[in-house]
Amino acid sequence: MNAVIFCDGSCGWLAPLSRLPKALLPVCGRPLLAYLLDLLAESGCVEQALIVEEGRELSRGFGTVYRDLPLAYAHTAPDRAGTDTLVITEPVLADFDLGAALSAHQSRGGMTALCVSVTEPEMYPLLGDNQAFTGCGILSAGMPLRRELYALALGEQAWIYPDAGMWHRVGSVREYLRAQRAVLRSGLVAGGIRLESGSITPEGREDTRLLPPCCTEEGLQTGTDNRIRGCVLGRNVTIGSGAELEDCVIGDGAYIGDNVVCREAWIGAGAMLMRGSCMEPGSALGENARLGEASVLRQGVRVYRDRRVPPRTDAADDVRSSLPVPLELDSGSLCGEMTPLGLLRLGAGLAACGDTAVGCAGDPDSRALVHMLCAGIALAGGGCLRLEDCTLPQLQAASVMGDCALLLYADAGSRDCLELYSRGGLPLTRRQEQQIGSALLAPYAGSFRKDRCGMVAEGSGLAALYARQLALRGRVPCGRSIEVSAGSEGLRRLAGSLTGGSGASLVFQLSQGGRRLTVYGEDTGFIHYEQLLLLCCMGCGMRGEDAALPDWFPAAGDRLMKRYGRRILRYGTQEGEARDLAIKQRFSLDGLELGVTLMELLADTGEPLARLLKQLPPLFTTRRLFCAGDGARRLLQQVCGNPRGGVLQEAPEGTVRVRPEGRESLLLYAASADMETACELCTQAERYLKTAVQQQKPAQL
């Protein structure tokens, strides 16, 4: 028999989200139509396939022969067929035994409707007891080739071929996600690779950064402490740190920021999810759309392609248009529209705090932002140290060498906000936050005055000096072969001086900005960021020195340093000795410095890394994002006594901390001696916060 596949129909649910026709929609890295053509080619009973299309995209993509199956293309199907014909009314994902169906059809003639049993009969057209019509039918020679097979089946009293096989219609976001999961779990060929178990890359190797089953194409860059399970990832996807992605489809070139949570969601090609954002099941972010920091897409909500959702938005309805968002400071980041007036206001606020080191990535948009920021700082009478085409670690080091009070980093290619830190990459102090926040809200009254204009200095030499110092320290013989995985070309170039060496391999995995690090070795498995900080503290203790760690770090650090008669100094938003020590040590602020410090520890001790790890206190951590709505800061004040967060629970089995992550979200951070307990503590904290939100009063944890 021959086959006719109708690919010229519209796809209303897809049009606002993607420019691709349904037949070319990727399913585990392959066009949806390719699965149908595989089915026809492997059946052995289809002699030729006619594809009905509107344009020429399919003919250019598939050619005239597919796996020895002749293909023809037309804008309309012929009125009648001269032989038995399989008609497929729209591209679907199917795995039928076409040979058995054809044999059953030839014994009866007329029309044979291929059907499958379904658990949600109200969602599909039925032709029997819970038998849903798949849109696929076999017509005898001489019958009219119509697309309306369901109406024809009802009128002609077609014979039903029940339980034809696996079938998934792709008519909504949820159905599209189900089709992806079916390929992941069924062993169908995806991206040229038959998925049986594990997380598969294009080369057929297991990707240990992902939890099976997953399928990813080339160019994946991930940060640290991520949990990615059951996902399909396209080419050149970038994922930050602390993200939780489950059963998601992520298109080519998408960007996922830090602490993002997505479950059963579709993220289109080129889309961006900024820090702390969340997508609930059934939601979709269209091509090149952007979900702002700490924003939430509720169940089933769609963001149309090229649209922008403002930061801290709770989207309960489809987003069809974008809204301008003023520039504002939130949790150390500057979010919103980068308008000239907003950047001039920002420049005035930075100038009020002291000199600022301003740097950017190498793209033209980032350079334009830096020029405008430097102009705003200079017009307000402030000093500015400018670095172009640099990485964030280089800028952090330059801010210390240049004696700058602040640093601001712009990367327009992968972030929705400007990153703002105090000297060396430390968190902003409360005074700095107040000064900058007030300047952004106040009317800009600046004017050009020659006697008050500030200075702009070139800082590229300081960036080069940091790279040289890093290279010199990286020559230490640590007894391991070092490989580096980084999320940007700049970081890869900078980390190139650390690669090489002899011995068992260690893979350094830098986060997107380069501030955090995880390490993988065949003899050690994954060594998470917190464990690496403990190793560095061990080195400080051996030298008889104190160590500086962020205020959220678990008490395991204090227990470790007691062995050496030293202590942990914790830094946050207050000035003091801890911040000065953190700038001197730098390993808690810079992933590259952390890696070099680990290499020096291995060289100094001569101990195998696995043996050093056994000397650390047991420490496992987990992070979760909690959406608290408009009352997030009030809730923190209730449960912690501080709107900036703090310890939510402290017990012998572990500790739970909570801090703001955007205006309407909270980040829960649980630490314990085993992972199961850490997850349970986090779950208990979530229940407690939900109760507190409902009652709007403190409860006993």
Image (cartoon, helix red, strand yellow):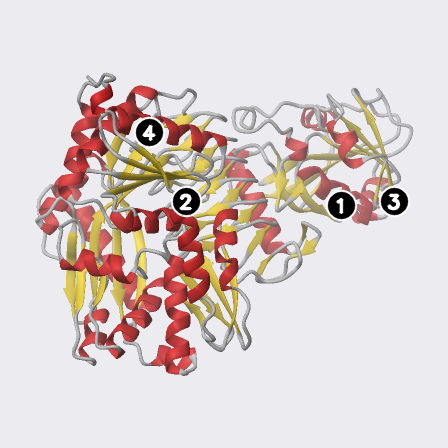
Relative image position of residue 296 (x, y in whole percent): 34, 36
Q: Is residue 321 left or right of residue 499?
A: left
Task: Say which amino acid is labelled 1.
Answer: Leu
Task: Say which amino acid is labelled 3.
Answer: Asp
Residue at image location 17% in from the left, 47% down from the top:
691
Pointer 1 or 4: first along the chain: 1
* Crowding near the residue tagged with mark 3, few <14, some 14–19, many ≥20 C-alpha atoms within 10 Å: few
Q: CA distance from mark 2 to mark 1?
A: 32 Å
Element marked by disc 2: strand
Question: Is residue 88 something that shows in the picture?
Answer: yes
Q: Is residue 149 left or right of residue 128?
A: right
Pointer 2 or 3: first along the chain: 3
Residue at image location 56% in from the left, 39% down from the top:
176
Q: CA distance from mark 4 to mark 2?
A: 34 Å
Q: Is residue 205 left or right of residue 492?
A: right
Pointer 2 or 1: first along the chain: 1
The residue where tag 4 is placed is 373
Pointer 1 or 3: first along the chain: 1
The residue where tag 1 is placed is 39
The residue where tag 2 is placed is 262
Relative image position of residue 486 (x, y in whole percent): 49, 54
* Crowding near the residue tagged with mark 2, few <14, some 14–19, many ≥20 C-alpha atoms within 10 Å: many
Q: CA distance from mark 1 to mark 4?
A: 58 Å
Question: Is residue 511 something that shows in the picture?
Answer: no
Q: CA distance from mark 3 to mark 4?
A: 60 Å
Task: Say which amino acid is labelled 2.
Answer: Cys
Relative image position of residue 273 (x, y in whole percent): 41, 38
